Amino acid sequence: MKKSSATRAHNGLLFPDGPTRSKRSPLIIVGLLAVAGLAWFATRSSPAAPPPLVTLAPERPVVASVPRDTSGAQPPRNWEELVAQRSAARRAAEATAPEQPEAIEPEPPRRTERPRRAPARERPVPVPAAAEQPASPAPAAPVSADPGRLTISSTPWGQLVIDGRMYGNTPRIGLPIAVGQRRIRIARDGFAPFDTTITVDPGENIRITGITLREQP
Amino acid sequence: MNLRAIFISLLLAAGLASEARAQSASSVLAQGVQAYQQLELSSAARLIRHALGIDGADSLTSADRANALMYLFATEHLAGRRDSAAAVSLRLLSMQPQYLADALVFPPEIVAALERRRREVKVLVAVPGYASSIRLR
């Protein structure tokens, strides 16, 4: 059979007459790629549901998952529909299961609530040592609403005792002292103690300075 | 004869004046110590600083200067001016690194504060060696 001069058959295909091998090969490659793409798309768009997007820990109760296509929705026919379906499914899963990441990751062991330890630096409470307190708790100098202030010093320094309770060493500046009559004593080993009685009025500043403790023989 | 008497009286006056100035430095320190004992802390700090600031032959001796700095440290500590107390303690420990506060005069809180500062401050004392002469050729 005589071929026409315009076309010629090659492997069952008609090509215009005269194209060289280098001109035909891109067409073949494009055609093969198109066939492969169609085949892959056909397998992807099969009626089987897409795999779930979220993996759940098997031990935990399932809070949410991507629903299978039970609503009778049509399987996606192209990429745009597939992407739209997946993004919609992801949004639905996020909306219904916000605690999903906790289900994926193993939860750390919970700590039992312990009573909090007191901070390391606390303001020291000016309470005298228990050993130094008298046996009968004297109402030494509880600070009233408007206490007086005591400034006291001695040479040499000594232990300040007010109504039988110790208040540190002299000198003391602006020590709050309760209103009323108070017994003041400054004592130190090897020295004769200094004793006096004062009457404190509300808001009064009392200064007792220039005390010299005499050495005991 | 008259000129000689004037000259001698001038010498005596100069000597007495310098003695009075020398006494004034220590007397200012004594006033400062008295103000400290009366717990007039502002006056005490001012007087002790004044005594420390007197220079020349009338200045305090090294021992008196150290005592003045110790009283000033105690004054600033009691007044709650910790930065100033730290600066004074640095002066004291730089001058006499082995200075020990009088535990009879100063309460344990102040002695302990000075000891804390001693641990914090490192003082390097440079002592010249025996062969420290310079020979000129």
Image (cartoon, coloured by chain):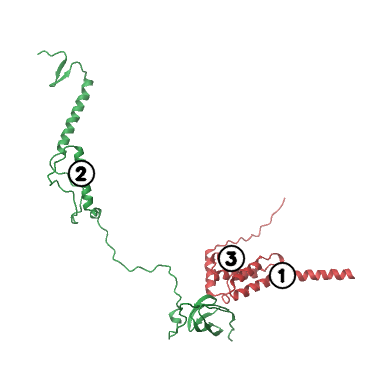
Chain colours: A green, B red
* Relative vertical location of residue A85 with respect to residue B23 in this rendering, above or below: above
Q: Are marks 1 and 2 on the same chain?
A: no
Image point (21%, 42%), residue name: A84
State if disc 3 and disc 1 touch (CB < 8 Å). no
Question: Real-space Cα distance between discs 2 and 3?
Answer: 76 Å
- Percent coordinates x, y for residue A95 in the rendering: 23, 51
Which subunit holds the residue at mark 2?
Answer: A
State if disc 3 and disc 2 touch (CB < 8 Å). no
Residue indicated by mark 1: B22
Which subunit holds the residue at mark 1?
Answer: B
* Relative vertical location of residue B90 with respect to residue B33 in this rendering, above or below: above
* Callout 1 amino acid: Ala
- Marked residue nearer the N-terminal end (1 or 3): 1
Q: Secondary structure at mark 2?
A: helix
Q: Is residue B4 left or right of residue A6?
A: right
Residue indicated by mark 2: A86
Choose between A101 and B65: the one closer to the eye.
A101
Choose between B134 and A57: the one closer to the eye.
A57
Question: Real-space Cα distance between discs 1 and 2?
Answer: 99 Å
